[in-house]
Image: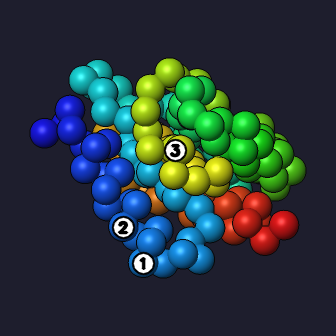
Amino acid sequence: SYNESYSRSYETVKALLQKYPTIECIIDLHRDATAAETAGPVAEVNGKNSAVYSYVISNTTETYEENSALLSKLNSIADSKYPGYTGEILERPYWYNQELSGKSVLIEMGNNRNNIEEVRRCAKIFGEILAEALEQ
């Protein structure tokens, strides 16, 4: 059930971190769900529409400062490579398994009404941004 999804994923992520201790970053990837008939916002990047993305961060975990610093770094890189195309940071007092790593990212790429190409472009751009952040 949806209500237990983070409890189940906690066990999965914990086991994967034990099995692969060199994992640097945990990514919790979503497309926002909406009942609306309209697609989520897009931005023009390199002449093509890309879904807009946002980050969700738990402000109640021990790793909050580290995760917040990572999101700031990601937005700094994004703004330097793609001016104005940065992720809104939404702070929430909920549990998203982000205490498992100081490099934990919950990202929402568009919504279920965006076309898949807009979301794929967003994912490609985010991948480039994340790779650069992890190399630094």
Residue 49 lies, in percent from the top left, at 56, 47
Give the CA distance from mark 1 to mark 3: 18 Å
Q: Residues within 10 Å of mark 2 (few under 14, many from 20)?
A: few
Residue 83 sits in quarter: top right
Name which residue lies at 58% across and 53% down: 101
Q: Which residue is mark 3?
A: 98
Mark sitting earlier along the chain (1/3): 1
Amino acid type, mark 1: Lys
Q: Which quadrant is home to the C terminus? A: bottom right
The mark tally for this picture is: 3
Mark 1: which secondary structure? helix
Mark 2: which secondary structure? helix
Q: 44 or 83: nearer the eye?
A: 83
Amino acid type, mark 2: Ala
Residue 36 lies, in percent from the top left, at 29, 22
Name which residue lies at 48% across and 78% down: 20
Q: Which quadrant is home to the N terminus? A: top left
Q: In the rendered image, is residue 90 in sight?
A: no
Q: 7 or 91: nearer the eye?
A: 7
User: Mark 1 touching mark 3, by CB under 8 A?
Assistant: no
User: Mark 2 touching mark 1, by CB under 8 A?
Assistant: yes
Q: Residues within 10 Å of mark 1 (few under 14, many from 20)?
A: few
Q: Which is in the foreground here, disc 2 or disc 3?
A: 2
Q: Which mark is residue 15?
A: 2
Q: Which residue is mark 1?
A: 19
- Where 133 sits versus 52, above or below? below
Give the CA distance from mark 2 to mark 1: 6 Å
Name which residue lies at 43% across and 39% down: 96
Amino acid type, mark 3: Gln
Q: In the rendered image, is residue 62 in sight?
A: yes
